[in-house]
Amino acid sequence: MKNGLKKWRLLPLFTALAFILSGCGEPFLSTLQPAGEVAQKQYNLMILSTIIMVVVIIVVAIVYFIAITKYRRSKVGEDVIPKQVEGSHTLEILWTVIPIILVLVLAVPTVALTFELGDQAELEKTDEEGNRTALVVDVRANLYWWEFSYPDQGIVTGQELVVPTDQNVYFNVIASDVKHSFWIPAVGGKIDTNVDNMNTFYLNFDSEKSAEAGDLFYGKCAELCGPSHALMDFKVQTLSSDDFDSWVASMQEAAEAEQQEPDSDLAARGAEVFEEQSCIQCHAVSPGQGAGTSVGPNLATFGERTYVAGILDNRDSEDSQEENIKHWIRDADELKPGNKMGGYNEDDLSDEDLDALTEYLMGLKVYTE
Ligand code: HEC
Ligand SMILES: [Cu+2]
């Protein structure tokens, strides 16, 4: 009976492990489920180096095992010294040449891929009218939010990057304050966003894999940047080429109109509060304004965002968006310590004004499919 139980004593451990590990590997967040050409190539490199490492471990383990079994004193007898191989030329050459070959097998594809993924030749190409054919997005990292602007389209958005599938998207990444790092685990990266110099690279979002991921990938800051570093999340929405074009058109139209008309009295009151409280000093509400200079995210498409501030999920329940917005405005400090907005308590902003503001913010929408 006791032995029977002993056999199972590791079961709780394995159950717990299985439970914890099942949290890994979601298609919208995992490097192990590559969702685009760049991610796939990076994944292949990881597999190549893992295979080489595993082979080395196996060979070393076998040699080790042979040594400790074959040369036991009980086997070879007392007072026996095996043949000494110190200074053996054959062995010395072997264990110098083999690692060099292994390093070469690793280095050649790594260096080649590094240059391939850094290739920007596509950016020089233009159509008959002289417009650039490649899609370029300027990414600006700020404590603790992300700005995405499309210089050729003249539009800007915050926290949620929108990209077309099955084509290369070129990124120019830069930071406003300290060094961050731009990373979409399932699709590729990471690449440092520096304050002084711009880094460039491209990614490709596969349409089938995007569909599996619900057309929403998670992006992360991958460089420790402050107390809320782990909360510096963004989302990536993927659209088909055609849908992306109509998204751009809607954004450009809204940029031209500058103001979105509030669709109720409450929302109209909210728009007033937005000005009275100087929210407008840090937040643009037109998709044409503020690229590269805003203190806070552009809110022109805020009503369409799947998350508030990148961390509060609006899809949780029916009223979650409203709750999230109020929670954020009241407790921004606690939700993201050290962020540049800070919360508004009842003395700063009455409950009625908060209701109106929330109604106004939820109505900020540009793109209806
Ligand atoms: C001093 C500048 C500043 C002021 C004033 C300000 N904000 Fe912000 N706001 C920010 C910054 C910076 C962020 C991004 C915070 C982060 O995620 O780290 C932000 C984030 C937000 C977000 C989340 C945006 C998103 O894309 O998910 C909302 C909503 C918001 N602010 C609303 C308001 C409202 C309403 C007011 C006025 C009552 C206001 N803000 C005043 C700087 C400001
Ligand atoms: Cu960061």
Image (cartoon, helix red, strand yellow):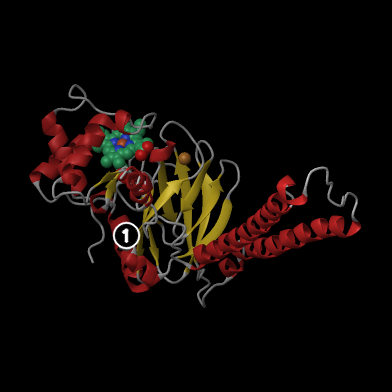
Q: Residue 209 at x, y = what percent?
A: 38, 68
Which residue is located at x 27 percent, y 56 percent? 257
In which of the image's four quarters is ligand 1 placed?
A: top left
Q: Residue 272 at x, y = what percent?
A: 18, 37
Disc 1 marks a residue whose amino acid type is Met
Q: Secondary structure at mark 1?
A: helix
Q: How many marks?
A: 1
The residue that label 1 is drawn on is 251
Q: Residue 271, located in which quarter of the rendered image? A: top left
- State left or right for residue 76 relative to residue 130: right
Which residue is located at x 14 percent, y 39 percent? 356
Q: Residue 244, located in which quarter of the rendered image? A: bottom left
Q: 212 or 219: which is nearer to us?
A: 212
Q: 303 or 25: which is nearer to us?
A: 25
- State left or right for residue 266 relative to residue 210: left
Which residue is located at x 54 percent, y 72 percent? 126
- State left or right for residue 106 relative to residue 206: right
